[in-house]
Amino acid sequence: MTATTTATAGEALARRAADVIPGGMYGHQAVRNLSPKYPQFFAGGDGAVIRDVDGNEYVDLMCSWGPIVLGHRDPVVNRAVQDQMDAGDCLAGPSATLVDLAELMVDTIADADWVLFGKNGTDATTACLSITRAHTARSVILVARGVYHGAAPWCTPDPTGTLASDRIAMGYFDYNDQESFDRALEAAGDDFAGVMLTPFLHVEGRDQELVTPDFARHIRRVCDERDTLLILDDVRCGFRIAHGGSWEPLGVRVDLSAWSKAIANGYPLSAVTGSDAVRAAASRVFLTGSFWMNSTPMAASLATIRRLAEIDGLARMQRAGARLRAGIVAQAAHHGIEIDYTGPDVMPYLTFAGDVEHRRMIRFAEAALRAGVYLHPRHNWFMSAAMDDEVIDRVLRGTEIAFDEVAKHALR
Amino acid sequence: MTATTTATAGEALARRAADVIPGGMYGHQAVRNLSPKYPQFFAGGDGAVIRDVDGNEYVDLMCSWGPIVLGHRDPVVNRAVQDQMDAGDCLAGPSATLVDLAELMVDTIADADWVLFGKNGTDATTACLSITRAHTARSVILVARGVYHGAAPWCTPDPTGTLASDRIAMGYFDYNDQESFDRALEAAGDDFAGVMLTPFLHVEGRDQELVTPDFARHIRRVCDERDTLLILDDVRCGFRIAHGGSWEPLGVRVDLSAWSKAIANGYPLSAVTGSDAVRAAASRVFLTGSFWMNSTPMAASLATIRRLAEIDGLARMQRAGARLRAGIVAQAAHHGIEIDYTGPDVMPYLTFAGDVEHRRMIRFAEAALRAGVYLHPRHNWFMSAAMDDEVIDRVLRGTEIAFDEVAKHALR
């Protein structure tokens, strides 16, 4: 702390934002619930690195909360975007790019016979609900308690401003708990239309849980027996776990999938894919938005999905994630600190044993931030294909300092 | 019709799309409900002109259904987008561009003390509902019958796949009908939370109606008396009618406004603006999306709003719209054809007297299309600042041919 009162660029922006943005900032990237040391405003990014407006550089373990899968400002993706801009973007209808992308997705994704595009992940999950209701002529959609499916009134984690009726046709069960699922099923009765699930359990502030294959198969079986639909919300996991959809490795078929985040390396696009059986219903639901046919995010997506295949981006992310896991686990052991490091290597989540209020994790995250590693203390992290061994080693130098800090305070 | 079976580029794309897109195409730009002569796929655009994938060029009277306000591929906007891409777009938070844009909007828009950004117009209208309910702790929102406020379950014009409960807290009245409004108000009772209105009545397939000042003032008075909110859905009209909001010229204050379409000349952005009184409620509602902090659409918006002011784009659109109206009215009179040409000059709508099934209008639109003018037979058209006298004269040469065609068939 110096004697001068000169505001940093970030502080100056935060003061201006306080005047023109309710609460100073909104949404999942608002830092008001984090340590005041977290930068709110960013100037740019390159590959695995982001820079805040004060020139501080961080390895970005959040990948912008998922979208950045090839790295920031990926040159191949940005070239595709600029080429599409040179032709046209928002026209009186789609360009050929929409068809090229839809074909690529149908070829790439195991259970996709068709595709619809939107902008937000919430557009995709909400469309899946409407398509399911149109297909089954039934109402009740079962979802797992506490799981994030978007910010629309039917699913927002904070119901302020929504109505009880927005969730009147939702049923709830505990993820990976077959008995709990069966109870929700019974409560839904004849009005059971479908189930929406994330590929694994990722809930802010809780250790992650992979899906148990028996649970996934049970849901598939019930949906088949009851002629209802299984919807995979692959918004957060898609194109990180498996090219063909996050349950493809499990061998459990899904009827509808929602996609967004990593689909276009940060350009605004979401998608619904589905099977032929659901195609007619999908064509009957009115789904639209002013920018849903824009070609530049589709050009970005085409380049992203192709590039991920070309460079085997998922293997790169897996290698980075495995190296990070091994490093973190070793550092914790070396410090004698008990941790849980849960979820897939490419989307890990760290907690400290007994740290129910996340105090140690907040200390860890602050120390990592000072050491040049941007991570969130209560949300899973993301790997990108831009994270090579050198980047992960740089992260580990930061986490080593962070573990030191946690250990030091644990001793007091 | 020739003997060859070679498909055009547009036909080839339509066949491919039929395999991978439910119904072949979706949303408001799907041409399946239009004449088969309408192109579905576009290759590009420049200024006031668009080109389909078969190389046909049209003056674009739809402006991509509203977003294109400065013209396609506006060089100033696209330069701003590329400069922002060179810095960064989808980062761990917003860039300074968000604050610059929010300040510009607060300075520009009469009733705006703060701004929130989303992607879709529907994001903005839905957020307005939630903010209104959070602010008033009441439920019922009154809207005008048949008016389009987006494609979410609470407002989609085609309820397929939605539930009756999605509209349980909506009340309906007839636009410009004070008695009808008062009846809806009475039905809402103590649970009346707010009213959402478009700046004037624009409903697909119906003549447009400007708002009557008495009606607007009545609603304002009721909202004040009942401590409820007046929400202006300026998604379609914003930045075409008046810089400061479409009811600014009327002198009727609004509490919340929804914006999208023309806000960023085609780049995906929407916004909610509101007054200080509603700020606290706006900060309590959880509103978010993966790409809502992306900087390139905000850079596009900043450039668009500044450019509109610099070149007095609204005056240009007004001049173009007045010239088009005068030309169309003269052509109709010359052909002895009775028409209605309704709505503001910058967003006009043409119907033929007694043409309840739109047959003459469909014939008119097809002939205009063949003559190089892209317009919709059942939806209002839009002016852009790229439409100079020469462009409008080119349009009028097309509509002259179209009136000829309508007159010829009327004689049979």
Image (cartoon, coloured by chain):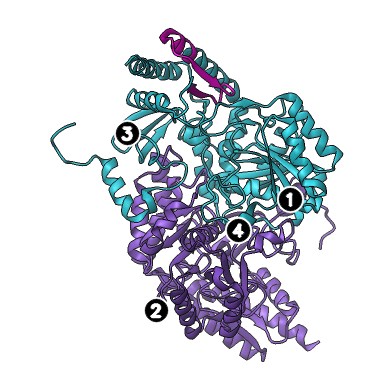
Chain colours: A cyan, B purple
Using the rendered view, name the quadrant where residue B204 is placed: bottom right
Instruction: Kindly check if marks 1 and 2 are in contact, taking CB atoms under 8 A apart as contact.
Output: no
Which chain is disc 1 placed on? A
Of residues A268 and A150, the one drawn nearer to the viewer in this rendering: A150
Q: Is residue B225 left or right of residue A275?
A: left
Is B66 rendered above or below residue A197?
below
Is A335 in the magenta? yes
- Amino acid marked by disc 1: Ile
- C-alpha gap between disc 1 and disc 3: 44 Å
Give the Cα distance between marks 1 and 4: 33 Å
Q: Which residue is mark 4?
A: B51
Quarter of the picture holding the N terminus of chain A: top left
Which residue in the structure is indicated by mark 1?
Answer: A131
Q: Are marks 1 and 4 on the same chain?
A: no
- The quarter holding residue A247 reads top right
Residue B35 visible in the shown view: yes
The Cα atoms of the two marked residues, 1 and 2, are separated by: 43 Å
At label 4, the amino acid type is Arg
Q: Measured along the vertical axis of the image, is residue B181 above or below residue B309? A: below
The x and y percentages for residue B391 are: 51, 71
* The disc label shown at residue A37, or none: 3
Chain of the residue where label 2 is placed in the rendered structure: B
**Viewer-nearest of labels 1 and 3?**
3
Q: Residue at x 34, y 59 (%)?
A: B104
Instruction: Write the start and end of the magenta stretch as one range.
Output: A328-351
Neighbor class of circle 3 (other Cα within 10 Å; few <14, some 14-19, many 20+) is: few
Q: Is residue A254 left or right of residue B71?
A: right
